[in-house]
Image (cartoon, rainbow, N blue to C red):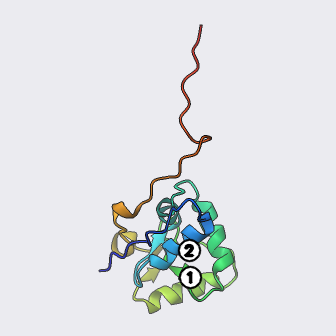
Amino acid sequence: MSTREPPASTGGAGESLRERVLAVVRAIPRGRVATYGQVALLAGAPRAARQVGGILFRSAERDDVPWQRVVNASGGISTHKVGAGTLQEALLRSEGVEVDASGVDLRRYRWQAPVSSVPEPPTSPESAPRPEPRRP
């Protein structure tokens, strides 16, 4: 079982969410899967699971992005492209991942990225905690 870590560059201030997401997805080992939420967390945007889906949807034609390794929170195949679900299942099976009618068994195939690889979320003046207003 491989525990490849996402590249150290994920979460860098100069990188876009798209670049960070693609770097995390490229780090998912063959024969393992991650959820959209897991990819978002590892990319430093823990609330961006839907954006991860959109990024992968627009990147599915690229050969260097193993988009098939990302599944929904239940291990299911989530796709709006006609035929892409069948393709995703076939690609996962070719990597040794068992896929049934309910999807992938996350207990068995989920990628366990080391916790140390999760970047700290970026801080900005807008996201800094604000003091509670004083009430008279």
Q: Quadrant of residue 21?
A: bottom right
Q: Quadrant of residue 84?
A: bottom right
Q: Residue at x 52, y 55 (%)?
A: 46
Q: Secondary structure at mark 2?
A: helix
Give residue 108's position: percent from left, percent from top.
Answer: 34, 74
Q: Which residue is label 2 attached to?
A: 22
Total residue callouts: 2
Q: Residue at x 64, y 70 (%)?
A: 55
Q: Residue at x 49, y 66 (%)?
A: 10
Q: Residue at x 51, y 89 (%)?
A: 91
In the rendered image of this protein, does residue 15 appear above or below residue 60? Answer: above
Q: Residue furthest bottom?
A: 94
Quadrant occupied by the C terminus: top right
In the rendered image of this protein, does residue 12 appear above or below residue 27? Answer: above
Give residue 22's position: percent from left, percent from top.
Answer: 56, 74
Question: In the figure, is residue 73 to the left or right of 111?
Answer: right
Categorize mark 1 by other alpha carbons within 10 Å: few (<14), some (14-19), many (20+): some
In the rendered image of this protein, does residue 131 appear above or below residue 49? Answer: above
Q: Earlier in the sequence, mark 2 or mark 1?
A: 2
Checking the image for residue 65, the label placed there is 1
Which amino acid, by three-letter code, is at mark 1? Val
Which amino acid, by three-letter code, is at mark 2? Leu
Q: Mark 2 and 1 residues: CB-CB less than 8 Å, in contact?
A: yes
Give residue 79's position: percent from left, percent from top.
Answer: 63, 74
